[in-house]
Amino acid sequence: MTIIKIEAGPYIFKGKLEEENAPETCEKFLGLLPYQQKVIHSRWSGEAVWIPLGDFDLGVGFENHTSHGSRGDFLFYPGGFSETEFLFVYGSSLFASKMGILAGNHFMSLVEGHEHLMDFGKLVLWEGAQNITFSLDN
């Protein structure tokens, strides 16, 4: 089981890669580590934050994809109808864009830090973009 440390704003979370269900996405994501970006609040997906990636190509298609992420799920949308993105769900969410409902690869699930999800989501909503860093948990 591969555990990823997620430093998001002032919070630390830990996520488990869904390597059995999304092996290609997990393998490509591991190749990005350590990975640092800014996360902003979603526009159409409800209680979620996202990392917009434009036309970035991770080199994966759809696997283990869903529109209904649960609290603490990380989804990767490989692009097509909307831009490529990572979505981090902190509450009630239906993955969508201005084009309509999207499906993203569910590739990671939180295993620690659920108690901070709502606070982190509200921080991004009211204070704006926050730094987020993903690294292997040692």
Image (spheres, rainbow, N blue to C red):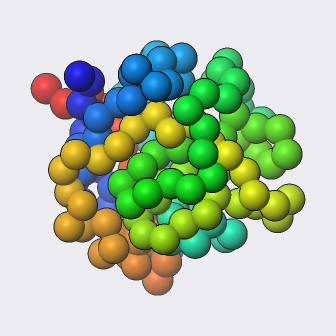
Q: Position of residue 19 (x, y in %)?
A: 39, 22
Residue lying farthest left?
Answer: 138
Along the viewing direction, whichever of 126 and 110 lies nearer the viewer = 110
Along the viewing direction, whichever of 40 and 110 lies nearer the viewer = 110
Question: Is residue 53 shown to the viewer in this render?
Answer: no
Above or below: residue 27 compared with residue 95: above
Residue at horizontal 38%, vertical 60%?
71
Q: How many marks?
A: 0
Residue at horizontal 85%, vertical 45%?
81
Quadrant hosting residue 54: top right
Asked whether, in this view, residue 78 is left or right of residue 86, the answer is: right
Q: Position of residue 42 (x, y in %)?
A: 60, 66
Asked whether, in this view, residue 11 is left or right of residue 39, the answer is: left
Residue at horizontal 86%, vertical 59%?
99
Residue lying farthest bottom?
Answer: 126
The quadrant the N terminus occupies is: top left
Question: Is residue 135 shown to the viewer in this render?
Answer: yes
The quadrant the C terminus occupies is: top left
Q: Position of residue 44 (x, y in %)?
A: 69, 69
Q: Position of residue 113 (x, y in %)?
A: 20, 57
